[in-house]
Amino acid sequence: MSASATNGNAPPAAPAAAIETFALTRSFGETLAVDHLSLGVPHGEIFGLLGPNGAGKSTTIKMLTTLLEPTSGTARVAGFDIVAAPAEVRRRIGYVPQMLSADGALTGVENLALSAKLYGMARAERKERIREALEFMGLTDAAKRLVKTYSGGMIRRLEVAQAMLHRPAVLFLDEPTIGLDPVARRTVWDRLRELKVRYGITVLITTHDMDEAEELCDELAIMHQGKIGVIGEPAELRASLGPEATLDDVFAHYSGGAIHEGGNYGDIQRTRNVASRLG
Amino acid sequence: MATSSAHATLPAGSGEGSRIFSVFAESAAIAEVEMKKLLRDPTELFTRAVQPTLWLVVFGQVFSRVRGIPTGNVSYLAFMTPGILAQSVLFAAIFYGIAVIWERDLGIIHKLLVSPAHRVSFVLGKAISSGFRGAIQCMIIYILALALRIQIKWEVLPVIGVFAGVALGSAIFATFSLIIACVVKSRERFMGIGQVLTMPLFFASNAIYPLALMPKWLRVVALVNPLTYLVDALRGMMIAGGQNVHSLGADFALLAGIFVVLAAIAAKLYPTLVR
């Protein structure tokens, strides 16, 4: 189960990982947001990317989802190169941004129908997939209501439904349970696990939430200043620091204790905005 | 669970024909959503009717008595009606980009851009929906014109032409607005630029006075202003006895050309919204 750092010359005969990055790098002016990142995520795993604000998690996700081109290096997602074949990658991934991406002025079904059309699904298939996704996410009864009347948890579930509609091979979620109450949070976790089991979808999430990392993720990578500090299963990581160690300790150890101080004005504002909209 | 076989249902997207078809289907999907939202909350359409009403009822009525502006064989009120129609379309469409900044701040744009849809479809979808808004504006102005007893050219083809011109003009200014949104990326800066642009575009055009009255430098500005060609086309088709300076074909060809160029630029810039 353990992911290993991979180099670009890996033999093609081995079953390729769902996500592989090769010295993936992105800088903004002088700042190196992601610094020669090389990691692999096996198929069918829930992989957690942890790190303080500004560690490069969001930039990494933006590159893996083709929203942002790398400055150098590249990655393969679902078998295709993000730089050479971004359109092929897009067909095979789903993405739930941290912010509120469902349209409140539309109903649940309308949101889903828009996604289905943008993925080029034919009418009959569209209907069936929408029905299935609504049922899977427990939103069938709310399907015809405007999304602005949904609770935070329902909105998140709808966003996951939108992202899974076309049966992606890899699903990316940026802080999927931020601002949700404990019950809603558990429901989202439960659905993500079920996506993995039922459809074999590989899931990559970013999170700040150590409970989420511990309970949901098969494997974790802790990022700090654009680099991976450590990769491993949650239990493995804890054990490496001692019998009493918690994930918080692991996090602090590999990210320079930055968890309580991280975040610039923009990050904080965005996080609070999301929290207030969902709450 | 095989991950590759699950995608067999997605179209390969190869071939020029299927590409045009999917751009069309995607644009229609975006436009459909926009129109649904508009019809669900049409207050905007009514508030947008206030300004042209004031221009025609107050400004137009007063300036009709001046008789200092040469308007050929039509009354000043009739002369300015197509100008006010074009202006109301411009003012509505030029702020269209602010919705895109809003969607960007929410994360909707991120979600859309991760889909395999063609980037140009997002631009065309917005342009179509702006064209639809323009057409509603147009209906309102026709009703106003009727109430003010302005001599309208009630013939099928010219009326269709007016609606087509208004839709095209509205698409042009909305796409221009989208480009500004992609460049400035913040609501505050966008509002500033929008305010700065509207009045010059309006006054440096033939909307409420003929180009012949302008000093030479202003005429040059007016001749590179798309609004001038929109007003010119509308004036010929909307008003009984109205004359266009350029030929209708030239006006429409120019507007269509401007739209194609703007749409191409906007499609290139659209993905930069999320960077």
Image (cartoon, coloured by chain):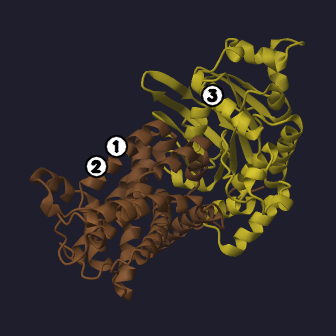
Image quadrant occupied by the N terminus of chain A: top right
For badge 3, the amino acid type reads: Gln
Q: Are marks 1 and 2 on the same chain?
A: yes
Quarter where residue B12 is shown: bottom right
- Where is residue A31 shown, x and y percent of the image? 47, 22
Q: Amino acid at mark 1?
A: Val
For the colour brown, the matching chain is B
Pointer 1: what residue?
A: B196
Asked whether the beta carbons under mark 1 and mark 2 sit within 8 Å of each other, the answer is yes
Q: Are marks 2 and 3 on the same chain?
A: no
Q: Nearer the viewer, mark 1 or mark 3?
A: 1
Instruction: Say which residue label 3 marks.
Output: A269
Residue identified by numbered label 2: B200
**Mark 2, chain letter?**
B
Tell me the CA gap for discs 1 and 3. 29 Å
Report the front residue among A68 and A149: A149
Graded by Cα atoms within 10 Å as few (under 14), some (14 to 19) or many (20 or more), the crowding at tag 2 reads few
- Residue at 82% of width from left, 43% of height from top? A188
Image quadrant assignment for residue A128: bottom right
Tag nearer the camera, 2 or 3 = 2
Q: Chain of mark 3?
A: A
The residue drawn where x is 46% and y is 43% is B272
C-alpha gap between disc 2 and disc 3 = 36 Å
Q: CA distance from mark 1 to mark 2?
A: 7 Å
